[in-house]
Image (cartoon, rainbow, N blue to C red):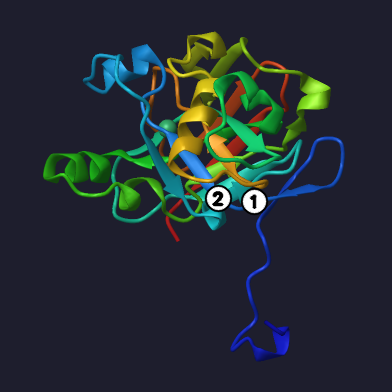
Amino acid sequence: MSASLLVFDAPEPVCVPVSTGGAFPVRRIYCVGRNYAEHAIEMGHSGREPPFFFMKPADALLVVPEGQTGEMHYPGLTADLHHEVELVVAIGRGGRQIAAADALDHVWGYAVGLDMTRRDLQAGMKKSGRPWEIAKSFDESAPIGPITPVSVCGELLKGAITLAVDGELRQRGDLSDLIWNVRETIAAISQAWALQAGDLIFSGTPAGVGAVLAGQHMHAEIAGLPALDVRVLAAE
Ligand code: MN
């Protein structure tokens, strides 16, 4: 449709900087629930279940350029904002029914992300069997650092994933501990949706999730990727 027929200006695409230059335009954000056994156990589950997914809108990203500290406002409606550090997989080639053996051919790069969660609201929604969006898909709920092309960082099949709050280590895991690894996750998502270039996958968080307060600083690291720093500001 001609732009002149739009009844208001369309929003610009959300773009994440690439560590080697340029920007990655984002289409959808898929997230994997409970994908590290110790985290599943801390959330009251066995750690052995089929993968399951939820989504965040692309404009829930809080894009943090390399070397900068992002600023996330403490969201409303919660008194229990939790950090979840996650490996983010950036999809460069789409597909349906992708075989796990071929899945890495669809990966464009990787980034460090945070799946911020209003845990009190999530607990309420779980209890009543209602959708999680209000707990997971709010504005600024997905801070993300630069995307590193897989041609630079290689496949990230193992390596430390950590998160510190005000210098205190809160989360520590290893990518090799993913219950459903990147290949299997891409295969599973592509059974349910047609993946396309521009999709991001937040692959799940290791144990140690917990509350973060206004004024605190989160420092997230994954071996081989630029770190992600985010300060939590008071509610607007
Ligand atoms: Mn998560």
Give the left or right position of residue 78, taking residue 187 as reference: left
In this rendering, position of residue 54 left or right of residue 63: left
Disc 2 residue type (three-letter): Arg
What number is the disc on residue 28? 2
**Measuring 65% from the left and 37% from the top, which residue is drawn there?**
90
> Camera-side residue: 13 or 85?
13
- The foreground one among 231 and 118 is 118
Residue that numbered label 1 is attached to: 26
Q: How far across and how far down the image is residue 66, in percent? A: 76, 37
Which quarter is ligand 1 in? top left
Q: How would you rate the neighbour count of disc 2 (Cα within 10 Å): few for under 14, some for 14-19, many for 20 or more?
A: some
Q: Secondary structure at mark 2?
A: loop
What amino acid does circle 1 point to?
Val
At 87% from the left and 42% from the top, the residue drawn is: 21
Q: Residue furthest left?
A: 128
Q: Are marks 2 and 1 in contact (CB under 8 Å)?
A: yes
